[in-house]
């Protein structure tokens, strides 16, 4: 689904005009095309924390509230899976520009590209770093503005 597409609607109006003695009814009509402007997406919020560096992101992460693990490598590759990161359901590439992490997935469970807006902060309690992300645009079966918290499990 592409967000922001314009809605176009065609309205056909018919009117009947009777002739004399009721014979010769003729339908006359007009066509009007109306285009509705797409509704603007609400702004994507900036996650808490400072902008991450590549060094911050590299490592293994677990998604809070989901059984999903992520691995980001220093050479710009990533993988995610629910069970085994050594044989992941999806692999791909990632880039970082400021707070934006671009991901291109090439796997059986997800063949898509999307962007996260990210912030990193020290974890609460005894946890290590937390990577807070918001989908800046839809991708991999998630809608824009979906929030995820990833907790570092290994550097």
Image (spheres, helix red, strand yellow):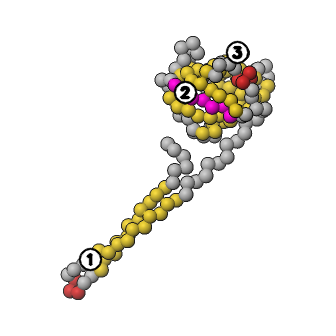
Give residue 104's quadrant in the image. Answer: top right
The residue located at (76%, 35%) in the rendering is 48
The residue located at (29%, 74%) in the rendering is 27
Q: Residues within 10 Å of mark 1 (few under 14, many from 20)?
A: few
Residue 110 x, y percent position in the rendering: 51, 28
The residue nearer to you, when weighing 65 against 59, is 59
Q: Residue furthest bottom?
A: 20
Left or right, 48 with respect to 27, comes to: right
Left or right, 133 with respect to 27, comes to: right
Marks 2 and 1 sit apart, C-alpha to C-alpha, by 60 Å
Residue 93 x, y percent position in the rendering: 59, 24
Q: Mark 3 or mark 1, which is nearer the start of the sequence?
A: 1
Marks 1 and 3 sit apart, C-alpha to C-alpha, by 78 Å
Residue at label 3? 154
Residue 75 x, y percent position in the rendering: 65, 19
Q: Mark 3 or mark 2, which is nearer the start of the sequence?
A: 2
Q: Main secondary structure of the magenta part?
A: strand
Q: Are marks 1 and 3 in contact (CB under 8 Å)?
A: no
Residue at label 1? 26
Whether residue 151 appears in magenta in the rendering, the answer is no
Q: Mark 1 or mark 2, which is nearer the start of the sequence?
A: 1
Magenta range: 100-106
Whether residue 101 appears in magenta in the rendering, the answer is yes
Residue 67 visible to an observer of this rendering: no
- Residue 46 drawn above or below residue 149: below
Residue at label 2? 105
Q: Are marks 2 and 3 in contact (CB under 8 Å)?
A: no
| Front position among marks 2 and 1 | 2
Q: Residue furthest top?
A: 86
């Amino acid at each position: 689904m592409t967000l922001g597409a314009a809605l176009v609607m065609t309205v056909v109006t018919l009117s009947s005009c009777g002739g004399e003695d009721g014979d010769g009814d003729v339908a006359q009509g007009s066509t009007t095309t109306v285009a509705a402007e797409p509704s603007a997406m609400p702004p994507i919020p900036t996650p808490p924390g400072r902008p991450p560096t590549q060094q911050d992101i590299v490592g293994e992460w677990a998604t809070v509230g989901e059984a999903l693990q992520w691995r980001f490598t220093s050479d710009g590759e990533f993988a995610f899976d629910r069970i085994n990161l050594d044989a992941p359901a999806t692999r791909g590439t990632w880039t970082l520009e400021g707070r934006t992490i671009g991901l291109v997935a090439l796997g059986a469970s997800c063949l898509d590209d999307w962007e996260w807006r990210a912030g990193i902060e020290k974890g609460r309690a005894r946890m290590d770093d937390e990577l807070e992300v918001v989908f800046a645009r839809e991708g991999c079966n998630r809608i824009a503005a979906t929030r995820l918290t990833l907790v570092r499990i290994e550097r």
